[in-house]
Amino acid sequence: MAVPETSKLLDKERYSRQLYVLDLPAMQKIQGAKVLLSGLQGLGAEVAKNLVLMGVGSLTLHDPHPTCWSDLAAQFFLSEQDLERSRAEASQELVAKLNRAVHVCIHTGDITEELLLDFQVVVLTTSKLEEQLKLGTLCHKLGVCFLVADTRGLVGQLFCDFGEDFTVQDPTEAEPLTAAIQHISQGSPGILTLTKEAHNFCDGDLVTFSGIKGMVELNGCDPRPIHVHGDRTLEIGDTANFSCYLSGGTVTEVKRPKTVSHKPLDVALLQPRVVAQSSQEARRARCLHQAFRALHQFQHLNGRLPRPWDPVDAEMVVGLAQSLEPLKGTEGEPLEEPLDEALVQTVALSSAGGLSPMAAMLGAVAAQEVLKAISGKFMPLDQWLYFDALDCLPEDGEPHPKPEDCAPRHCRYDGQIAVFGAGFQEKLSRQHYLLVGAGAIGCELLKGFALVGLGAGASGGVTVADMDHIERSNLSRQFLFRTQDIGRPKAEVAAEAARRLNSDLQVTPLIYPLDPTTEHIYGNNFFSRVDGVAAALDSFQARRYVAARCTHYLKPLLEAGTHGTLGHASVFMPRVTETYRAPASAIASENATYPVCTLRHFPSTVEHTVQWARDEFEGLFRLSAETINRHQQAPTSLAEPDGLKVLTLLQEVLGVLRERPQTWQDCVVWALGHWQLCFHDGIMQLLNRFPPDKVLEDGTLFWSDSKQRPQPLQFDASQDTHLLYVLAAANLYAQMHGLPGSQDQTALRELLKLLPLPVPQNLVPIFPNDLELARASAEFGPEQLKKLHKVLEVWSGSPPLKPLKFEKDNDSNFHVDFVAAAASLRAQNYGIPPANHAQCHHLTWTWTCWDRLKVPAGQPERTLKSLLAHLQERYGLRVKMLLHGKALLYSAGWSPEKQAQNLALRVTKLVQQVTSRMLEPGQRMLVLELSCEGEEEDTTFPPLHYEL
């Protein structure tokens, strides 16, 4: 068997989501790795699928055993047509189709010492103990990372041996700590002062520095240990002979490698280190450890596993567990723990089964440990992990399945029937579930539904709802999709793939989102046919909406999500559990609001820079196109109250050009001009208005506390961030105007060398607070309106522009590239640690607030006009729409005449007039809903409580 060396370039688009969690060196190690996987039942299939999607260099499959009916309950690469075929041979082709960049081959002979030398990692699944011990000893001697994974019914185990001297380059799963520097003293020790008090540095942390002006000796220095001196100060060692500190800079944590030592399986079998959160969990894990040992011994004596729910076989397993050699503690002392006989008996009764969910869970963890073994990223398991889902069985007092109900039927569900019985299988087939989201988790759920037979009966079914289309970056984790599916609706492709896994599955795809706009589709009739909902969504706003619908219709909700290396899954049952609540950290993140003037002129955090960059995207490439298109269709509909905002925006969109762009070079010229405006000219304009020595009325400096004085940047095409900004901005500008773009960075650099820097522009009005902004908007008059129409004439008579809706899951469209580059440059202006590409991808940008906006009606009662003015003055909200229930009270898109009619009315009279209903006697409040300008269409604002 010859496995070719891998020397391929990394497909960064395909593996983009992995690169967010790992890094390029780790991915390159994975791409060059060779893995041997022995055992291709359900658990082995999960490991194989995950490793191939992960992009290992080569995967060798080993399983000469013939396919049987019980395999089909969890082995999704096999079908009825593969019965009696070797599992490895039957699986190879479908495994390889998951990722053609991975070399997938099979080994049909014995596993020898010579064979093991060709691999970095060896994984055994569903293997006999004798084979585990033999190969574990060889791998430990040869320095090959060794894993054992197994499931028995509702219990699973995982063992890792990465050798006695395994180095973990990144022991944590967190980004390195960073902070902006305000000052560094010369001395021994030098004292570094941070710009903000909040930091997580600890004594002894190693740090390095970048971006410092003046004391440049620290930039890129070898890691230095620190001592936390105060809330904002750190001791950083001797700086006495360094240059004087001038400004700027970032201090960044340097991760320390850690060495771990694993024992070989023959030692760890009797002296197990188990992963547990408490002493009680540890005792249970050790009892499960003994149960597995007893099951191995039972199989060795009888040539088979215990029969499903056979009390005689189960008692024999308990007896074997009692006779085992006692386990030892960490120091080699005997552990005198009583055996939980009831637990061992329950494990034995259900051990003959093979379940897809158990294989998926253990297969995911096993593949992740393989990733750690290859890359050296993150701490490996130490060394045994036990997982059980025995709480899925009937509770105390309820009858357990009978042996005859769990006997094989020679059908694809035999592995599941062995655990739960035929009656349970029939109930599953009659269920009708709604799956919301067909992304990474959604594909896994749909695979599981197909394998367990959920909705596979005549009266059952699964509905898959997802409005998105498949992108190339989906292929590394959404295994139901293939390269030829790119561009197709996820729901439709996922449904087709699920039917191939189980032809009896009744699955219906829907490409409509589940949100308030589709309640006529997902309404009473729809939910009356649904038994439960599974949500696999990527935003807390969408999860909250789906959870609210489940609560309204009293339907169970299964909800799951991931974030980097973290994940969660929750179950919400009507009248049994609490309703869904987003994590506090997520609510805080989504609720974060930043005043407009802070974002535009005085940012102090990485979140500010990312939000500013996202607002730039929305204004330049979506709102401007919509405004221009709207004006072309109805020139008289332009509302003068918005004139200043629209004029400023369109002047920026036109930029240094004098006519609509016609070529790629025009787009580059515009992008370069906008770079100059944002990161040089605009900063100079701000500093001219507020010079460094400006003092406020109270005697304090204007540039102090959270107001960090910015520095203009000088454009340099040799700097990657500068080039990326122009590349992304020019491509987005081209897309908006229907022009071809370019990804050729070399050609762009050469073109930029030929282009002169634009003359200084002063297009960005500077308003240090919302009051000045409101005053300037109110003073927008005929002269400014004339300018606005003149700018709009540039696009008159030309094809409509294409508004660009921000899409974070497509890594080839330059959306995230633009935000990442713009945020990084903005951070450089203000000396803020820049956001990396992953942070820009994951940060929540939607403006939401879950407080109540309370407005008293007043005496005399407010008019609608005064209410809107109050919302702008008090909350900074320029209302676009105002509703009471489904009744529209106000729209910024109405004609001036229509607006004037409603603006003059008292709010209560307007509500009664629009709804044709009188207020209830004693009514104390009107609950109004609003949307505001400059926000995404699906942004949710807090309800407005208009107190009567």
Image: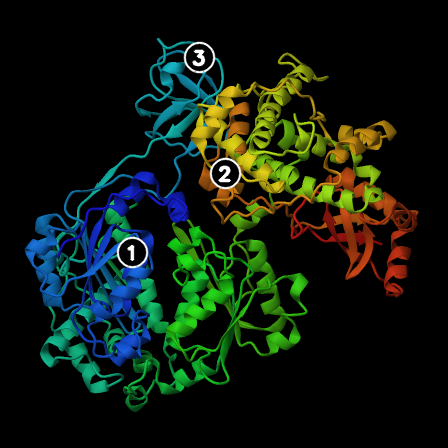
Q: Residue under circle 1?
A: 51
Relative depth, front residue between 446 and 916: 446
Q: How is the image coloured?
A: rainbow
Task: For the N terminus, give its image quadrant.
Answer: bottom left
Q: Is residue 198 left or right of residue 759?
A: left
Picture layout, residue 137 above or below residue 79 = above
Q: Secondary structure at mark 3?
A: loop
Q: Amino acid at mark 1?
A: Leu
Q: Position of residue 751 (x, y in %)?
A: 50, 25
In the picture shown, does residue 766 fall above or below 391?
above
Per the image, label 2 sits on a secondary structure element best described as helix
Identify which amino acid the numbered label 3 is placed on.
Answer: Gly
In the displayed structure image, the side of residue 741 where residue 931 appears, left or right: right
Q: Amino acid at mark 2?
A: Asp
User: Residue beneath label 3, please?
Assistant: 214
Residue 817's disc is 2
